[in-house]
Image (tube, grey):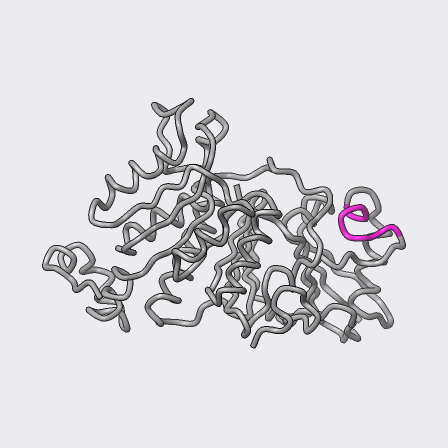
Amino acid sequence: MNELTDEDRATYEWQMWVPGIGDEGQRRLKNASVLVSRAGGLGGLVAFELAAAGVGRLVIAHAGTLKPADLNRQLLMKHSALGSSRIECAARTLKELNPSIEIVAVPENISPENVERLTALADVVVCCAPLFQERFLMNEQAVRHNKPIVDCAMYELSGQVTTTVPGKSACLACRVPTPPEDWKRQFPVFGAVSGTVGGLGAMEAIKLITGIGEPLTDRLLTFDLRDMRFRTIRTQRRPDCPICGGVS
Amino acid sequence: MTITIEYYGPAREAAGFGSERVEVKSATARLLIAARATHHGGRLAKLLLDAEGRLKSNILIAVGDRQVEADSDVELRDGDEIIIVPPVSGG
């Protein structure tokens, strides 16, 4: 267990004043490892907030090179990095914000080949991937290895956040037994929406790590920023779920 | 009785509005959503309904703050609010 330094206490002072955090909560964050896939509009904000909060290790999986169309929401990226590796740019930005944390920058998207290895590195998984195939892979591995998984998603001016604790709450396959057939990888959204969802997802991870508050376990938050409607729905496990049905 | 239906994400986009109030004598949640999707037709029907006109299994629906479980339905009461949440992802 890594202990807090005087520099840590100076850096995280404001959040350590939050009831329930203090030295112990901050120590938990410092010793935690979170897998984030990917580092785009959602995952980039999750990673940014977790880096700022002092999560000791961030494992971030993201392939590809930066395009102009990424810049309206992928706030870890820089205009000067257009055409170069997105994960390298994301890692640089995170290190500039917090040089004391470890960044495991994986220049790959989640795939059947790497999902088990990457999930094993994490205490908490945050899923922000655009493809349902990736999301189902992460969900399956998180459940199999009993890792809590925060599921972040968005569309247009709306967002969804929920948290699965394997064996206790509904997993992605309970809620979405089949992927939507018409889902397109590119869709309308503002960066302010992905930032909102990313901030909520990061807070879920912080709550899971520190034990404060009540994560969205068994609940799904859905909201629409067009008219500021926020709803929390109590979700149900499927007893016949092929992923978590037999897990207790 | 009066039932309010709230549409989120792609359902709002497909419907063209965020919510509607409907007057019905009696209904269950799934049957009312299927009826409204058929009534509005077009993209909303395509998003919510399968080839047999039934609500797709990957559309999360709730009455109030309670999810309506798969393969079940809920008898509606006056003033109920139905929430329709299609799956979305990141990017």
Quadrant in which residue A105 is drawn: top left
Q: Is residue A232 left or right of residue B74?
A: left
Image point (56%, 77%), residue name? A248
Q: Which residues are magenta?
A: B44-51
**Rendered view: A165 above or below A140:** below
Q: Is residue B48 magenta?
A: yes
Q: Is residue A93 magenta?
A: no
Q: Is residue A7 left or right of residue A72?
A: left
Image coordinates of residue B81 in percent, x first then y, are 69, 67
**Residue sitting at the far right:** B52
Image point (53%, 64%), residue name? A144
Image coordinates of residue A221 in percent, x first then y, are 54, 61
**Residue sitting at the far left:** A6
Image coordinates of residue B39 in percent, x first then y, are 86, 51
Residue B31 visible within the image: yes
Quadrant in which residue B16 is drawn: top right
Image coordinates of residue A219 in percent, x first then y, are 55, 68
Image point (60%, 53%), residue name? A136
Residues A102 and A206: in front is A102
Quadrant in which residue A28 is drawn: bottom left
Residues A222 and B55: in front is B55
Residues B52 and A178: in front is A178
